[in-house]
Image (cartoon, helix red, strand yellow):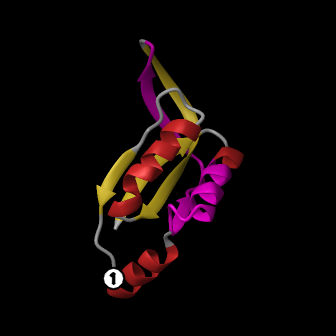
Amino acid sequence: MIIVLTSVDDKSKANFIAQSLVQQKLAACVQISAQGTSVYQWQDKICTENEYYISIKTNKIHQDKVITWLETNHPYDIPEIITLNAKASTQYEHWLQNSLA
């Protein structure tokens, strides 16, 4: 199982990402967290923004497709795209694999 993390500044953008990836069967599940605060440096300034954190559940086979989709469709110039290898319960892993294209 692979978890891809990203964030956006608007709930409708987060919903668009989630709906699109699940509908295309690139992700089995996408979780959108409640709004949080991100502090980062951009163009030599410290920025503070409210963002929604997105956790995308997929597999190794679809990982590159999810990353490419995010690079093409994400509203940020340089989106946060972080991948994590994860281990899930056997039942969840089975469901995940059956949910993907």
Can you give x and y, in whole percent of width and height, for residue 25 in the image?
55, 65
Give me the residue at 37% from left, 65% from top: 59
Residue 43: quadrant of the picture: top left
Residue found at the far top of this picture: 44
Residue 89 vs residue 59, the one in the foreground: 59
In reply to whether residue 30 is colored magenta, the answer given is yes
Q: Relative to 93, does residue 67 appear above or below in the rendering?
A: above
Q: Position of residue 31 (x, y in %)?
A: 54, 62
Residue occupying the point 67% across, 42% down: 10
Across and down, in percent, residue 87 comes to 28, 72
Q: Residue at 53%, 67% (x, y): give it.
A: 29
The image quadrant of residue 96 is bottom left
In the picture as drawn, the residue positioned furthest to the right comes out as 12
Residue situated in front as seen by the camera: 28 or 45 = 28
Judge whether residue 5 can be spotted in this image. Answer: no
Q: Nearer the viewer, residue 47 or 93?
A: 93
Number of marks in the rendered image: 1
On the rendered image, what quadrant is the N terminus found in? bottom left
Q: Which residues are magenta?
A: 14-43
Residue linked to disc 1: 89
Q: Is residue 93 visible?
A: yes
Mark 1 secondary-structure assignment? loop
Q: In the current view of this chain or complex, which residue is farthest to the front?
A: 101
Mark 1 is surrounded, within 10 Å at the Cα level, by few (under 14), some (14 to 19) or many (20 or more) other residues, namely few
Indicate the amino acid at tag 1. Answer: Ser
Q: Is residue 10 above or below residue 87?
A: above
* 34 part of magenta stretch: yes
Q: What residue is at 47 percent from the left and 79 percent from the top?
A: 98
* Residue 71 percent across, percent down from the top left: 49, 38
Taking 39 as reference, is 97 above or below it? Answer: below
Q: Is residue 13 left or right of residue 7?
A: right
